Image (cartoon, rainbow, N blue to C red):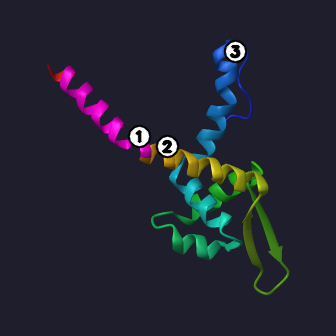
Amino acid sequence: MSDECVEPLSEVQAEACPIVQIIDRVAGKWSVSILVAATRGPVRYTELERSIPGISRRMLTLTLRNLERDGLLERTVYPTVPPRVEYRATESAQELYGYLTGLLAWAERHRPDIIEARRSYDEALAA
């Protein structure tokens, strides 16, 4: 994800760019899974690794770093041997989670309409 929108921007691009940037960051299956886990309370790296089937250690680390960089996760290192690290959703992430669940409710409510629209479109295209 780029940190900036490239100038010059049309009016539409200026409005869409910040939205596209955040959706690019949080829409991935790994980011959503991590955010869901972190909104439930502090979570450790190994807990995330076990609870997200198919994620590699490298991808987990990269996604955690990106979410932390974007201010959606707080990382706390405890001075124990071995060191213990926990991730917690920030207030921004908690608010975002509310919007994501709203999007889920919208998708569930409109799923039959979308399925029907796709069917109609495909039939018309095939004709």
- State left or right for residue 70 relative to residue 104: right
Q: Residue furthest right?
A: 79
Residue at label 2? 106
Residue placed at 18% from the left, 26% from the top?
Answer: 123
Q: Amino acid at mark 1?
A: His
Question: Would residue 91 appear left or right of 127 to someone viewing this image?
Answer: right
Q: Residues within 10 Å of mark 1 (few under 14, many from 20)?
A: few
Q: Tell me where residue 18 sits by quadrant.
A: top right
- Along the line of sight, the residue nearer the viewer: 62 or 102: 102
Q: Earlier in the sequence, mark 1 or mark 3?
A: 3
Q: Residues within 10 Å of mark 2 (few under 14, many from 20)?
A: few
Residue displayed at 63% across by 47% down:
99
**Given the image, on which type of amino acid does mark 2 rest?**
Trp
**Is the Cβ of the residue at disc 2 closer than 8 Å to that at disc 1?**
yes
Residue pointed to by mark 1: 110
Secondary structure, magenta segment, majority class:
helix
The magenta span reads 109-124
**Cα–Cα gap, marks 2 and 1:** 6 Å
Residue type at numbered disc 3: Leu
Q: Relative to 24, does residue 10 appear above or below in the rendering?
A: above
The residue indicated by pointer 3 is 9
Asked if disc 1 and disc 3 are in contact, CB closer than 8 Å, the reply is: no
Q: Position of residue 93 (x, y in %)?
A: 71, 54
Q: Is residue 113 magenta?
A: yes
Most foreground residue, 116 or 88: 116
Q: Quadrant of residue 46?
A: bottom right
**Residue closest to the eye, 98 or 36:** 98
In the rendered image, which quarter is residue 2 located in? top right
Asked if 9 appears above or below 96 in the picture, the reply is above
For label 1, the SS is: helix
Please state, as top left, top right, bottom left or bottom right, where the C terminus lies in the image. Answer: top left
